[in-house]
Image (cartoon, rainbow, N blue to C red):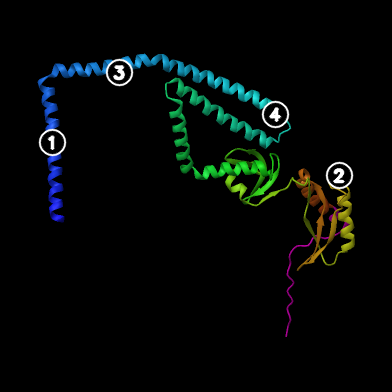
Amino acid sequence: MNILNLISTAAATAEASTREAATIKDAVDELVQNPEETASKIGEFFHNMLQSILRSIPTIILAVVVLILGMIVCKLVLKVLGKGLDRTKLDLTVNNFVKQCCKIVLYVLLLTIVLSVLGIPATSIVTVIGTAGVAIGLALQSSLSNVAGGIMLLINKPFKIGDYILVSGVSGVVKQITILYTRLDSDSNQAIFIPNGQVSGAVVTNNNTNGTRRVDMKFSISYSDDYQKAREVILQVLSRNDRILTDPAPTVRMLEHAASSVNIAVRPWCKAADYWEVFFSVTEEVRAAFIESGISIPFDQLDVHVVKE
């Protein structure tokens, strides 16, 4: 039975090929025998196509005019909206996010109007947009996760523009929060772009939320130096620094007995914006004060004792 089926299938295929070849041969014969009629039909086709193009020119011009005017109107609306949002007390992050969403909505609406002017039914446009949205959504799943992450950042507000944060192993000042990514400017002024999906799912350390920060430093003195004297010298340096807060009071305590030094923990508090200035200035001033007070700053060393037998 299988062999008979194969034979019948092959015969049917051969018969269909023969019919197609005959049809093509008849068309070629007609073209050769009646060249004037064929040329007339071709000329009529191009004439009808030209007439259709000429009839469509006013509609195309109208669509272009609507597109240009629509873009101008969209820019004016966005400009007025931006000024209105800037006058409100909305957070800068929310402000920028709303502007971006309004921009997308306005241009999608303009595109719909232009297509309607060209004669495409609104129902077809909505269907195409919906289908395209599904297709784009499937193709850009990671981007949609970034959009969702941006919305979560907008709702939860773990940080805002101007905050100094640490996220995903990088740190910097938040300069921009868009729908898809968050931009940080690092300490060396490098622009770092992190997808919002990654930011929303990561551990974020915000150094500005509480307003103040503790500056953790460590200073070392030798075992032969007076710890209490060194402590008083450090406290005097801290008291002269206007950026260091008195409440909470700075902590200066012995930290550990190291291999070749006594380490002192110094923990002053300051405003978040003054962190690095306090860190560097105190480090410089403590060293100068130690030298002036005769307190040595030890370095790692190894004592070797040779025993003669």
Tags 4 and 1 touching, CB below 8 Å: no
Residue at left 85%, top 56%?
Answer: 251
Q: Residue 5's spot in the image, x, y percent?
A: 15, 52
- Residue identifier under label 2: 242
Q: Residues within 10 Å of mark 2 (few under 14, many from 20)?
A: few
How far, Cα to Cα, is label 2 from label 1?
99 Å
Image disc number at residue 49: 3
- Residue identifier under label 1: 19
Mark 4 vs mark 1: in front: 1
Q: Secondary structure at mark 2?
A: loop
For residue 15, side relative to residue 180 (left or right):
left
Q: Earlier in the sequence, mark 4 or mark 1?
A: 1
Mark 4 vs mark 3: in front: 3
Q: Earlier in the sequence, mark 2 or mark 1?
A: 1
- Residue identifier under label 4: 86
Residue at left 61%, top 50%?
Answer: 201
Residue 52 visible within the image:
yes
Q: Amino acid at mark 1?
A: Arg
How far, Cα to Cα, is label 4 from label 1?
74 Å
Tags 2 and 1 touching, CB below 8 Å: no
Q: Amino acid at mark 4?
A: Asp
